Amino acid sequence: MAINKYKSRILIRYVWIVSIFCIAWFSYSCAALLTNKHYSVRIPDNSYKILEVNPGNVDVSATITINYAGQNYPVPVTEEDLIHHKLHKKFFYNKCFNYIFYEGDGNGFWRFAIVGIGIMVILLLLYLKKYGD
């Protein structure tokens, strides 16, 4: 009986930890997606200049420095786009947080997939608590 009570406490603790993580991640994701949608403007092709290219240590990411409106901004891009000279995608300027991002960064729906995985973990832990040994 004491062992089941102890396992139940551990499962409840994990449910709380995963729940708090999911709520925080969901709030952060909503804020990031909304600010990118409402405060971002497309940078015209002629108004920026690529100053330097810094290939990353990993084969996945690299950084370029862009001069836009008199300021230098580091922008993460994929290594594949740099190798094949495919920087034809659009750059966007976020007025709210004063940074530039590349259109190839993705659409952000992977953020909600992480929340979905967290919800599935919570349901699994609750199932184990109820029907586990």
Image: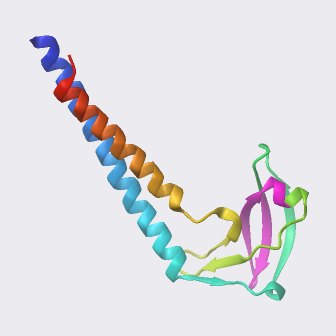
Q: Residue at x 29, y 45 (%)?
A: 19
Query: Whole-percent x and y of residue 7?
Result: 21, 20
The secondary structure that most of the magenta stretch takes on is strand
- Residue 44, by quadrant, is bottom right
Please, is residue 118 above or below residue 24 in the view?
above
Q: Residue at x 51, y 61 (%)?
A: 109
The magenta segment is 63-81
Tell me if residue 72 is in the magenta stretch: yes
Please, is residue 53 above or below residue 50 in the view?
above
Quadrant (top left, top right, bottom left, bottom right) of the N terminus: top left
Query: Whole-percent x and y of residue 114?
Result: 46, 49
Q: Residue furthest front?
A: 131
Q: Is residue 53 left or right of residue 9?
A: right
Please, is residue 91 above or below residue 63 in the view?
below
Query: Whole-percent x and y of residue 20?
Result: 30, 47
Tell me if residue 85 is in the magenta stretch: no
Please, is residue 17 above or below residue 36 in the view?
above
Q: Residue furthest right?
A: 84
- Residue 82, by quadrant, is bottom right
Quadrant (top left, top right, bottom left, bottom right) of the C terminus: top left
Q: Residue at x 24, y 25 (%)?
A: 10
Q: Is residue 96 left or right of residue 64?
A: left
Q: Which residue occupies the foreground of this view, 54 or 10? A: 10
- Residue 72, by quadrant, is bottom right
Query: Whole-percent x and y of residue 90?
Result: 74, 76
Q: Is residue 81 left or right of residue 33?
A: right
Name the image colouring. Answer: rainbow
Q: Residue at x 42, y 61 (%)?
A: 28
Q: Which residue occupies the foreground of this view, 90 or 28? A: 90
